Image (cartoon, rainbow, N blue to C red):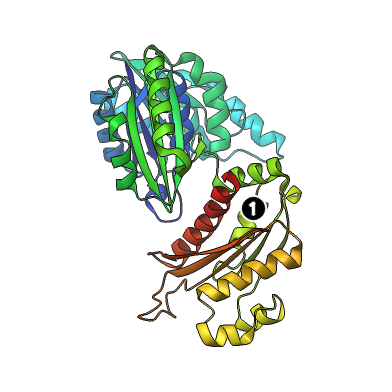
Amino acid sequence: MITAEIIAIGSELLTPFRSDTNSLFLTRSLEEHGVKLVAKGIVGDDINQIVFAFRTAFERADVVICSGGLGPTIDDLTREGLSKFLSIPLEFHQDILNSIEERFRRFGRKMPDINRKQAMVPQGARVLANHNGTAPGIFLEHSGKQVFLLPGPPFELEPMWEQYALPLLRKGPPYERKSFRIAMLPESQVDEMLKPVTDNLRDVQYTILAAPSEIEIHLFAPESAADELISAAAEVRSILGKHLYADELEPLEAVVGRLLKEKNRKVAVAESCTGGFVCQRLTNIPGSSAYFDYGLITYSNEAKTTLLGVAAELIATHGAVSEPVARAMADQTRKLAKAYYGISVTGIAGPEGGTLEKPVGTVFIGLSDETQTTVNEFRFIGNRPRIRFASSQAALNLLRLRLLD
């Protein structure tokens, strides 16, 4: 099995303001080409730390891929770090400098002298052309290892990887993956449900990932274990049943939209604590006008009364966050829109407004159609964004289950 490690280099990636997205792109590509990722990390612009990262990667991986640190400034030290680690000198390449100068000329500018640094390449390395920036990539084979140095900006890294790096990559048998998404169940419960599958896996690897209000299941295996993978995936589908809302990583709103289209039905939404988030998710899907054309944000009690026609007495008696109000909101929005389904969300997203009886995270979700109206009460935990997302997830999942019935 061929193994790889990814190192993202740049002190900005150690701050709260930038994230490493290149590793996600590279991980998917490596998996498709039969290379197993064993580690990935982030290193700041410090040559000693970069050398240490190379040393560690060489000990545990066959392929080392670095992104970032190939620019012209004083803090771009990736090529210098590799040179120091391998005790290989850097050589000046006039053709690289000519290419960089020409790029500046095309934009009507003179190349600063500091860009000469980008023409330095470890001795014996191959240069990977960069058609979208000034930093060339570098490929080197040493001590049986493959090393790729790639620029940091994704619009430079991705085409360079596809066009010039992949043909050089040492590849293994490709892995196949089956992925599933489950809504509104805790990770521990899903893991327990799947023990009859996971306890008997041989060559198939299993990963369970928790995200807000949903769980992802990943099964992956080499081609040689394709039959076991297919069998395990079928067992997962059988055990999870309606809890499983998507094969692969399709978002819940896309699944709901497809079901609405198939049944030729429309949905209307009235939201309070989610402030239009359910409507936003539904309309994020191209073609959503086929099943959605009516949504109201009735945040205040007055809005619930004047826009939806919810009786003021009902709100005064039970409170805006209650089963009767959620029921009335769902019924009224469905009737006003002349839609088949009506959804309502009313709750306390926090961080203030909770009581002993109705703490922060209390949410009522109504679902109305031409035959029945149901209301479900939830007690979500977390901060305000997490509660709002969980509420939208629960609302869409309730509609999905109703559509399946």
Q: Which residue lies at the image location 45% right of the left edge and 38% below the top edge?
A: 241
Residue 32 in percent (x, y) is at 47, 22
Residue 257 in percent (x, y) is at 65, 46
Q: Is residue 124 visible?
A: no
Q: Amino acid at mark 1?
A: Leu
Q: Which residue lies at the image location 58% right of the left edge and 27% below the top edge?
A: 159
Q: Is residue 338 visible?
A: yes
Horizontally, residue 266 falls left or right of residue 366, namely: right
Q: Which residue lies at the image location 56% right of the left edge and 33% below the top edge?
A: 156
Front residue of 185/12: it is: 185
* Residue 125, quarter of picture: top left
The crowding category of the residue bearing disc 1, from other C-alpha atoms within 10 Å (few below 14, some 14 to 19, many at least 20), is: many
What residue sits right under mark 1 in the picture?
A: 282
Image vertical order of residue 155 relative to residue 95, above or below: below
Residue 40 in percent (x, y) is at 34, 35
Residue 351 in percent (x, y) is at 42, 75
* Residue 63, quarter of picture: top left
Front residue of 101/338: it is: 338
Q: Quadrant of the N terminus?
A: top left
Image vertical order of residue 183 relative to residue 380, above or below: above
Task: Tally the numbered discs.
Answer: 1
Image vertical order of residue 338 relative to residue 3, above or below: below
